[in-house]
Image (cartoon, rainbow, N blue to C red):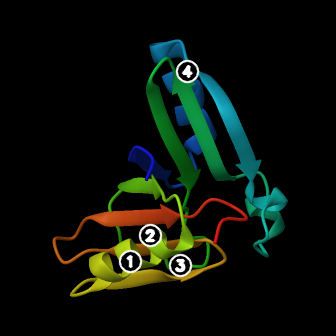
Amino acid sequence: MHAAVPYLTFPGTCAEALAFYCDVFGAEVTIHQTMGESPLEVAPEAESLVFNAELRAGELVLKASDNPGLDGSAMPMSPISVFVTCETSAEQRRIFDALAAGGQTLFALEGGFGMVIDRFHVPWMLAGPPNVP
């Protein structure tokens, strides 16, 4: 398992927040994917919003995205989640199932990604590396 990383969720202001944090920490955005570039079907007004981004400054790593709730159903979670990349699909499944027990599944573990809020109300995002059994 890789180090856990804070994942920040914004109501449509992610790009602005990332620019601010780059200035504050002397960081650079190393990943930036818009909603329009994602596999999601989104309304034209949401295409420029951030689907997935990563900011790095030395050992500081933050991941972030927008969740504006454009359809009126913003995810029921904190603006900060814990993002974990697992070494194998088996490890990812074991951790996901353990966190989901007594909690709430937000996104079923499919396609190498899943989201859950554990029984202590902590939101988790679990990713598996591509092409790993």
> Where does residue 25 sit, x and y in percent of width and height?
46, 16
Q: Residue at x 57, y 43 (%)?
A: 14
Quadrant (top left/top right/bottom left/bottom right) for the C terminus:
bottom right
Q: Residue at x 78, y 63 (%)?
A: 38
- Place residue 56 in its image quadrant: top right
Give the number of the mark in front: 4 or 3. Answer: 4
Q: Earlier in the sequence, mark 4 or mark 3?
A: 4
Q: CA distance from mark 4 to mark 3?
A: 30 Å
* Mark 2 residue element: helix
* Mark 4 residue element: helix
Q: Residues within 10 Å of mark 4 (few under 14, many from 20)?
A: some
Q: Earlier in the sequence, mark 4 or mark 1?
A: 4
Q: Residues within 10 Å of mark 1 (few under 14, many from 20)?
A: few
Residue that mark 3 sits on = 72
- Type of residue at label 2? Glu
Q: CA distance from mark 1 to mark 3?
A: 33 Å
- Type of residue at label 3? Gly
Q: Residue at x 38, y 77 (%)?
A: 94
Look at the numbered discs 2 and 1 and tell me whether their residues touch, using CB distance below 8 Å. yes
Foreground residue among 69 and 84? 84
Residue that mark 4 sits on = 22
Residue that mark 1 sits on = 94
Give the number of the mark in front: 1 or 3. Answer: 1
Residue that mark 2 sits on = 91
Q: CA distance from mark 2 to mark 4?
A: 33 Å
